Image (cartoon, rainbow, N blue to C red):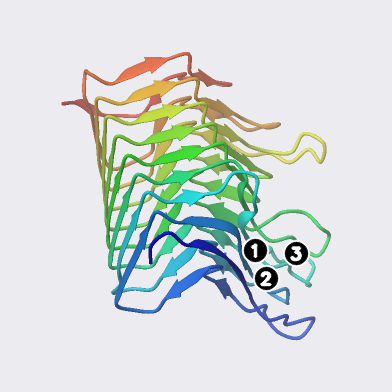
Amino acid sequence: MTQCRLFGFAIGGDGGNDAAGGAGLGGDIYNAGGVLTVNNSSFFDAQAVGGSGTVGGTGAGGGIYDAAGTTTTISNTVYETGTDVEVLGGTSTVAGVAGGAALGASIYQAGGSLTVTGTQVLFGTELRAGLSSTGTVTGVAAGALLYMAGGNVSMVNTSIQAVTLQGGTVLGGGVYQAAGNLSMTNCTVVGVLAASNGAALGGGVYQAAGNLSLTNCTVSGAFTVSGDFVARRTGDALGGGIYVGGGTTTIQKCAFEYDSAVSGLGGEGIGGAIYIAGGSVCISNSSTFAFNFASTSNNDIFGTYTVC
């Protein structure tokens, strides 16, 4: 697929008051298997929307949903400025039940192999979790560029700029890694806002498990903002740039600048650049930290790591 301009939507079925909402998967492309190549193309007005119901449906992969076992290459491609490349979780119709999850505004990777080079995700990309029956955003939002459930992903010369996530919990403003192997080289994550009604973890990248390598990357102006001051909800904001929950992480020759972790009422903002909760983390001496901020403590790094 070369020199294409893609738009479309996937909307899960409405379960009403009797059944769960359906999933909306792959707004522009649903890759069930085989090989997919996208080159010199653009995505715009791509939407994956979970259906409403007793449990809100999941929205995943506004641009591309890759099922397990696929091989996908994306190069020199743009998720366009000023258009709606977005994923919305479905609304719950039952009191006390959270809305549906919103996962991977640009790409949802269930497994297999993904290579992304020379690609930009720009302002206009949005990830919003589903609403509760009272109209409050309560579901999980994760990964504006990529939600990675597993497999092998390589990203080179790729940028994520000025994207927004909203959820009851937000995990990984730019990238969410649940498992597998992820390599990011010469990439930038700039101006990502991960705002939640509860906890906000990892404004740029959230690593739950697997192997993560960042080389010559810049994470700048990534924010985790937790809680809701108007409704007086509380939540922690941890890791403005990166949150590491587990796995193995190597960070070499990277720059962290103007990243912030700002908490709501009663919560804590810790690790303006990096928050390490677990796993094994190695950070090179050649990585730099400047002008980062955390509302409670540790403007740059919180947690245990080694120098490599």
Residue under the image location 71 percent in, 66 percent down: 97
Residue beneath disc 3 = 96
Type of amino acid under label 1: Gly
The single residue placed furthest to the bottom in the displayed view is 18
- The quadrant of the image that shows the N terminus is bottom left
Q: Residues within 10 Å of mark 2 (few under 14, many from 20)?
A: many
Mark identifier at residue 89: 1
Find the distance from the CA under tag 2 to the CA under tag 3: 12 Å
Q: Quadrant of the C terminus?
A: top left
Q: Badge 3 local density, few (<14 within 10 Å), some, or many (20+)? A: few
- Tell me which label, 1 or 2, sits earlier in the chain: 2
Q: Secondary structure under badge 1?
A: loop
Q: Residues within 10 Å of mark 1 (few under 14, many from 20)?
A: many
Asked if residue 105 can be seen in this view, the reply is no
Q: Tag 2, which secondary structure? A: loop
Say what secondary structure mark 3 lies in. Answer: loop
- Which label is found at residue 285? none
- How far from the left and from the top, in percent, is residue 25? 53, 72
